Image (spheres, helix red, strand yellow):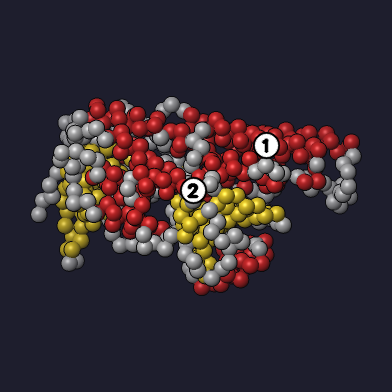
């Protein structure tokens, strides 16, 4: 049976796609927008990321009237972070009156879908999208071709819409097709190895945890339920040939004692799951360089390292801004009007998204290594928080990661403050930052001699260069006008 034509066809019913379907379906107008929400399978997804929603994401749900999507997910309130490095333990709390949520990703997505499908003008279609349909004359995308299975029979049909929104995730099949000349290839930072710890006691319950193990990249943890804790282990290429051996013999000894047994049990009983960590800057859409009639949304368009857990906040805020851009539209037939709104949306969401993208890349760049100058910067970052009796720097950090401070300039200044503080400590209290070694290879203790200070100055210069090399690529990708 042929499907009717829709105002909007959305490909993908994940976080961004489901939220966008609800956002468009609830725009008040005489004739509500007809939205087709196409998903390969509406069964509960099972992913190892997208399980921490920062306060800005919680607020975006409220703005979209989708807070009820959290009902029944077993979501755990998250009040901030706990940072652990060796014997140092720092607690950082979100701004007063705000909190995040952590949960099983699949349960949250099912909640979003439930809210979206409560709208009678949202039509869910379980099918696989095989290609975009283009007008043979204008080249404009006018719909999608789908393949669905029913009673072991495969059926093919076309779904038409005035606007197609592709939100098919990080492994998007249509990214290059939509962006054409503007397409950017995702860059793989590293890989995440994940497990769920059973009955583990987090270092600080109700908080996300960032562990900085000696000689290894940072490890992130957050509660999924009262009895389950997600653990995300970052591993750079080349990956260890024997990952269990790496976890049991290299990683576990560096963890707090309270976590060692649950980690061993988790990786012995569960299958090891791996996912690439990608960086993809947002290309400008609605221009002559990309296709007409279609846009990208969510991870199909913009990705960052998951160390800060801000991905869903960016996606939901994007939906809020895009709904605002479309709120006065009567239809999406005029591409000039649509593309103008899309270009405006690109800059409306720029400050918020860029701040979180820079934060993610910068923080990962500092904490992903524990050797050479990176080791000094990592130590300096922890000391930057610890040597802050007023709590001002911790407060500023949480304003950035929670999504309340959307100033890229202020964030660059913040990273510069970390580098300056680390450099100052290197020159005035080198024992807090550097591992000083004498000519005989033995560790040096006590006050530094004058002979050591030229080396300290060189180390400070190298730290400044390292910080610049970490930040410049992401700054350039976010600042470029195309």
> Which is more toward the observer, 407 or 178?
407
- The disc at residue 302 is none
* Camera sees residue 14: no
Figure quadrant of residue 335:
top left
* Camera sees residue 198: yes
Q: Position of residue 264 (x, y in %)?
A: 59, 70
Q: Position of residue 296 (x, y in %)?
A: 33, 40
The quarter of the picture where the N terminus appears is bottom left
Q: Position of residue 360 (x, y in %)?
A: 53, 43
Q: Which residue is mark 2?
A: 98
N-terminal of the pair, mark 2 or mark 1, is: 2
Residue at (22% x, 33% y) in the render? 329
Q: Does 42 sit above or below residue 448? A: below
418 relative to 358 in the view: left or right: right
Residue at (24% x, 35% y) in the render? 293
Q: Does 103 sit above or below residue 295? A: below
- The disc at residue 419 is 1
400 relative to 303 in the view: left or right: right
């Amino acid at each position: 049976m042929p499907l009717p034509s829709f105002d909007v066809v959305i490909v993908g019913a994940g976080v961004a796609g489901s939220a966008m379907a609800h956002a468009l379906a609830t725009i008040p107008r005489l004739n509500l927008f007809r939205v087709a929400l196409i998903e390969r399978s509406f069964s509960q997804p099972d992913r190892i990321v997208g399980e921490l929603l920062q306060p800005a994401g919680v607020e975006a749900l409220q703005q979209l009237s989708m807070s009820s999507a959290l009902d029944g997910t077993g979501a755990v309130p998250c009040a901030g972070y706990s940072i652990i490095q060796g014997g140092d333990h720092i607690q950082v709390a979100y701004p007063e009156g705000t909190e995040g949520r952590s949960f099983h990703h699949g349960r949250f997505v099912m909640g979003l879908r439930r809210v979206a499908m409560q709208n009678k003008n949202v039509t869910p279609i379980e099918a696989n999208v095989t290609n975009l349909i283009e007008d043979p004359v204008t080249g404009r995308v006018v719909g999608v071709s789908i393949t669905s299975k029913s009673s072991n029979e495969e059926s093919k049909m076309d779904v038409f819409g005035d606007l197609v929104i592709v939100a098919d995730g990080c492994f998007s099949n249509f990214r290059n097709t939509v962006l054409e000349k503007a397409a950017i290839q995702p860059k793989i930072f590293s890989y995440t190895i994940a497990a769920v710890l059973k009955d583990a006691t987090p270092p600080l319950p109700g908080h996300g945890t960032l562990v900085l193990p000696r000689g290894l990249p940072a490890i992130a943890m957050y509660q999924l339920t009262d009895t389950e804790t997600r653990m995300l282990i970052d591993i750079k290429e080349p990956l260890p040939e024997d990952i269990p051996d790496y976890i049991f013999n290299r990683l576990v000894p560096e963890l707090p004692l309270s976590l060692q047994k649950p980690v061993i049990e988790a990786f012995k009983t569960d299958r090891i799951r791996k996912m690439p960590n990608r960086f993809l800057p947002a290309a400008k859409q609605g221009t002559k360089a990309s296709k007409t009639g279609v846009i990208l949304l969510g991870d199909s368009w913009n990705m960052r390292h998951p160390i800060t857990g801000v991905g869903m906040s960016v996606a939901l805020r994007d939906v809020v801004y895009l709904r605002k851009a479309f709120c006065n539209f009567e239809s999406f037939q005029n591409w000039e009007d649509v593309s103008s709104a899309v270009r405006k949306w690109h800059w409306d969401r720029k400050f918020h998204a860029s701040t979180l993208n820079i934060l993610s890349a910068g923080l990962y760049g500092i904490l992903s290594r524990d050797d050479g100058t990176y080791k000094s910067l990592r130590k300096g970052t922890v000391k930057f928080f610890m040597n802050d009796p007023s709590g001002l720097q911790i407060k500023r950090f949480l304003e950035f990661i929670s999504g309340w401070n959307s100033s890229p300039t202020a964030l660059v200044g913040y990273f510069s403050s970390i580098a300056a503080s680390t450099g100052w400590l290197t020159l005035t209290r080198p024992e807090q930052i550097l591992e000083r070694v004498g000519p005989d290879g033995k560790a040096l203790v006590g006050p530094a001699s004058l002979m050591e200070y030229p080396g300290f100055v060189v180390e400070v210069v190298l730290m400044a260069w390292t910080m610049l090399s970490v930040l410049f690529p992401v700054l350039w990708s976010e600042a470029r006008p195309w």
